[in-house]
């Protein structure tokens, strides 16, 4: 997930939050020259309630400390989202769990995507500061569990808990920026957080690689890849401490009167627990099916088929629940009926489906096939992440001058060209070519990654729908991360197992799985070249999925933009 730039206070609600109150409110000292247009953030419709105490803006020192705490929180989330990608090979080697690789990349997003909307409503119904600190606590507990994990299932559970807390951190940052930023400065504050997010995304794989490479063999130290999770603990404690000391929210941040009348059970029901549960259960069944089918190579097994059937039933149940929940649902189909918004959500789904899986497959290529250290692997994934970060900034800064439709087409097409190049990468491909194709793919992703969000926020008929369309777009972006990452990792394992079975029958496929994804050149003696070829075969199959997603994103973008241009000409 890339940090999404959202409208400033004058433009709409920047968080995935429903309006809290219709009572008049003025969050900061009055500015005679400032007039808010009608909308969910204007004094007539704002989400934040008020009382008889006159609200005051934060003093400059408190504001700076609060922004520092929020930036540190976003830094934690972004780094945690990417740091795992470069340490997966080491984890599979320690736990002998290459068959669990599907879970490693998906567990975090399994809870992040569905809990985004639930956290938004939690910030609506419960005290803001306490809710934000709770999200940090959950995030930290997940990292502690992952760092101490004695086995693979415990690590997966820790990642799922971290994802749940991370969803609350992101939603909380959007909300608090909206409250504390001085009038007209919300966009500047969001830009600061966007830069922080980009820096953390680059730093995550580097730190993961350095921890794994430099501390693994230090006697008496629980180091190696575990430090990638432990490093978040002091940083999270610092962020929570700064936030607790610095942020003195005005009394207007307390729950609204009409919501205080709701019981705790009613508030919890408004957070769509049925929808959240259905999504998590459905995707968990799908991942289990992927894991079983890929590791065994027998997709027709009864347990695999049963999990796929249950996934389908739960997916249908989720759609029905969302229809039933209507405005309380995380997916408001009334908004999604607009064809441009639906097209943009499809584009962001497939764009994110290219980006995140690459973060997990590239380290396997560098560490398993090229036999590089985790640290060297981290440095070699910089072109992808840096390309995304830099070209996201370029696209965002040019949006006021250039039409958003331009980047909606140029981005996916560039990404598609890069994906074609990545498909040609093999064992003997010169490093500059592999890095160049990474950078080209990252540039295309960066050019389009935030365009669907900003376009959808402009396309809604009413400012009151900004929160809803933001939540829908984020949900599809993160669901693309989740589903396709799981599919890609399962495809890699399946391709590896099938290739070993066909081309190296003298090597039990289970032995290759248990060996982990590091040191392949030294574990199988004279058969190592065959195993390396099979690793490359599995990776080639994953690049096909990325290429297909890039092609679909390009086609949808071209169709949508062509329809928009034809509609304008007809007028």
Image (cartoon, helix red, strand yellow):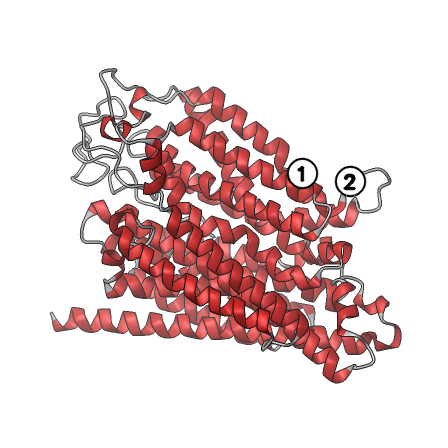
Pointer 2 with pointer 1, Cβ within 8 A: yes
For the residue pair 329 and 521, the one nearer the viewer reads as: 329
Q: Nearer the viewer, residue 195 or 539?
A: 539
Q: Is residue 51 left or right of residue 388?
A: left
**Looking at this rendering, what residue extends furthest in the bottom direction?**
502
> In this picture, is 571 found above or below 360?
below
Residue 227 is left or right of residue 56, and the answer is right
Please name the residue shown 41% across and 36% down the image.
172
In the picture, measured across the screen, residue 563 lies left or right of residue 507, that is: left
Q: Is residue 571 above or below residue 43?
A: below
Q: Which mark is residue 222?
A: 2
Q: Is residue 200 visible?
A: no
Which residue carries the number 1 mark? 230
Residue 373's spot in the image, x, y percent? 76, 57
Residue 179: horizontal and vertical position, in percent? 33, 30
Q: Secondary structure at mark 1?
A: helix
Where is 34 relative to 450, above or below? above
SS of the residue at dot 2? loop
**Distance from the alpha carbon under mark 2 to that under mark 1:** 10 Å
Q: Earlier in the sequence, mark 2 or mark 1?
A: 2
């Amino acid at each position: 997930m890339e940090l999404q730039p959202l409208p400033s206070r004058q433009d709409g609600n920047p968080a995935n939050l429903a309006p809290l109150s219709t009572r008049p409110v003025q969050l900061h000292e009055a500015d005679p020259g400032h007039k808010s247009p009608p909308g969910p953030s204007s004094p007539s419709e704002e989400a934040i309630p008020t009382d008889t105490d006159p609200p005051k803006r934060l003093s400059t020192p408190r504001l700076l400390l609060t922004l520092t705490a929020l930036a540190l929180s976003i830094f934690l989330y972004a780094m945690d989202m990417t740091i795992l990608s470069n340490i997966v090979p080491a984890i599979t080697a320690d736990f002998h769990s290459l068959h669990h690789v599907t879970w490693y990349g998906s567990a975090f997003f399994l809870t992040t995507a569905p809990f985004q909307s639930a956290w938004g409503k939690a910030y609506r119904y419960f005290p803001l500061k306490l809710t934000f600190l709770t999200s940090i606590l959950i995030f930290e507990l997940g990292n502690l569990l992952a760092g101490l994990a004695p086995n693979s299932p415990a690590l997966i559970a820790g990642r799922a808990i971290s994802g749940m807390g991370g969803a609350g951190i992101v939603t909380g940052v959007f909300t608090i920026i909206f409250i504390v930023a001085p009038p007209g400065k919300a966009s500047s504050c969001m830009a600061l957080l966007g830069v922080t997010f980009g820096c953390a995304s680059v730093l995550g794989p580097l730190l993961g690689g350095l921890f794994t490479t430099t501390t693994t063999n230090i006697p008496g130290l629980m180091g190696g890849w575990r430090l990638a999770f432990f490093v978040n603990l002091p940083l999270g404690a610092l962020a929570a401490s700064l936030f607790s000391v610095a942020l003195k929210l005005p009394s207007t941040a307390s729950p609204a009167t009409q919501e205080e009348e709701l019981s705790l059970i009613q508030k919890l029901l408004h957070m769509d627990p049925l929808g959240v549960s259905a999504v998590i259960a459905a995707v968990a069944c799908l991942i289990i099916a992927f894991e079983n089918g890929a590791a065994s190579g027998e997709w027709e097994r009864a347990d695999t088929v049963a999990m796929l059937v249950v996934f389908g039933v739960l997916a249908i149940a989720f759609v029905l629940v969302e229809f039933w929940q209507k405005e309380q649902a995380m997916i408001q189909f009334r908004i999604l009926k607009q064809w441009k918004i639906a097209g943009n959500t499809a584009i962001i789904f497939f764009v994110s489906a290219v980006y995140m899986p690459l973060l997990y497959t590239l380290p396997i290529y560098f560490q398993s096939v090229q036999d590089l250290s985790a640290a060297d692997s981290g440095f070699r994934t910089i072109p992808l992440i840096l390309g995304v970060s830099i070209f996201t900034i370029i696209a965002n800064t040019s949006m006021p001058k250039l039409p958003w439709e331009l980047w909606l087409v140029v981005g996916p097409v560039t990404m598609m060209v890069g994906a074609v190049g990545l498909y040609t990468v093999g064992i003997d491909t010169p490093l500059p070519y592999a890095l160049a194709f990474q950078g080209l793919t990252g540039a295309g992703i960066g050019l389009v990654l935030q365009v669907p969000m900003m376009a959808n926020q402009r396309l809604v008929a009413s400012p009151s729908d900004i929160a809803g369309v933001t939540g829908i777009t984020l949900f599809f972006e993160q669901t693309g991360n989740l589903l396709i990452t799981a599919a890609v990792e399962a495809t890699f394992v399946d391709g590896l197992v099938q290739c070993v079975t066909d081309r190296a029958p003298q090597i039990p496929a289970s032995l290759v799985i248990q060996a982990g994804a590091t040191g392949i050149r030294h574990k199988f003696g004279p058969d190592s070249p065959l195993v390396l070829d099979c690793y490359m075969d599995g990776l080639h199959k994953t690049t096909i999925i990325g290429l297909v997603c890039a092609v679909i994103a390009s086609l949808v973008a071209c169709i949508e933009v062509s329809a928009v241009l034809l509609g304008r000409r007809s007028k």
